[in-house]
Image (cartoon, grey):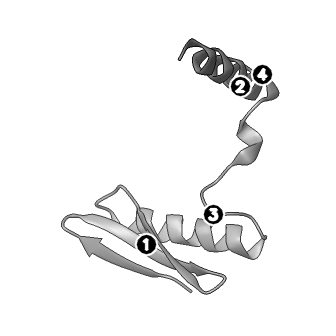
Amino acid sequence: MGTIYKRGEVFWIKYYRHGKPYRESAKSIKEGDAKRLLKNREGEISQGKLPGFYFDRVTFEDLSGDFLRDRRNQRAK
C-alpha cells in the first residue's frame, strides 16, 4: 500500500518494496496522474518486477556500442 502527497504544487507517491520505502515524483499537478502511477508501481511490485525500471527496452546494439565507446575513452586517458 502506498500514499500520495504534495510537495509544493506537484504530487508525489510513496510505496514500499521489501520493507524499504521508495518516493517518486508523479511529475504532475493532477492527483489522478499520481493515483495512476502509484497503482502502476504497486502492480509492478506484485509481479516481482523492479518498479520504474524497464530492462527490456535496452537492445544488445545499444549495450555493445556503449561498451566499445567506454573502452575507447578509457584508452584515450
Q: Are marks 3 and 2 in contact (CB under 8 Å)?
A: no
- Disc 3 on helix, strand or loop? loop
Q: Which residue is mark 1?
A: 13
Q: Earlier in the sequence, mark 3 or mark 2?
A: 3
Q: CA distance from mark 1 to mark 3?
A: 12 Å
Q: Is residue 13 above or below residue 59?
A: below
Q: CA distance from mark 3 to mark 2?
A: 26 Å
Q: State which quadrant residue 20 falls in.
A: bottom right
CA neighbours of label 4 inside 10 A, class few (<14), some (14 to 19), many (20+): few
Name the amino acid, label 3: Pro
**Along the viewing direction, whichever of 33 and 21 lies nearer the viewer:** 21
Question: How far from the left and from the top, in percent, is residue 52?
Answer: 60, 57
In this view, the mark in front (1 or 4): 4
Q: CA distance from mark 4 to mark 3?
A: 24 Å
Q: Which residue is mark 3?
A: 51
Tell me the residue at 33%/63% (across/down). Answer: 30
Q: Earlier in the sequence, mark 1 or mark 4?
A: 1
Q: Which residue is mark 4?
A: 61
Q: Is residue 36 left or right of residue 6?
A: right
In this view, the mark in front (4 or 3): 4
In this view, the mark in front (2 or 4): 2
Q: Earlier in the sequence, mark 1 or mark 3?
A: 1
Name the amino acid, label 2: Phe
Question: How far from the left and from the top, in percent, is residue 68?
Answer: 71, 18
Q: Which residue is mark 2?
A: 67
- Disc 2 on helix, strand or loop? helix
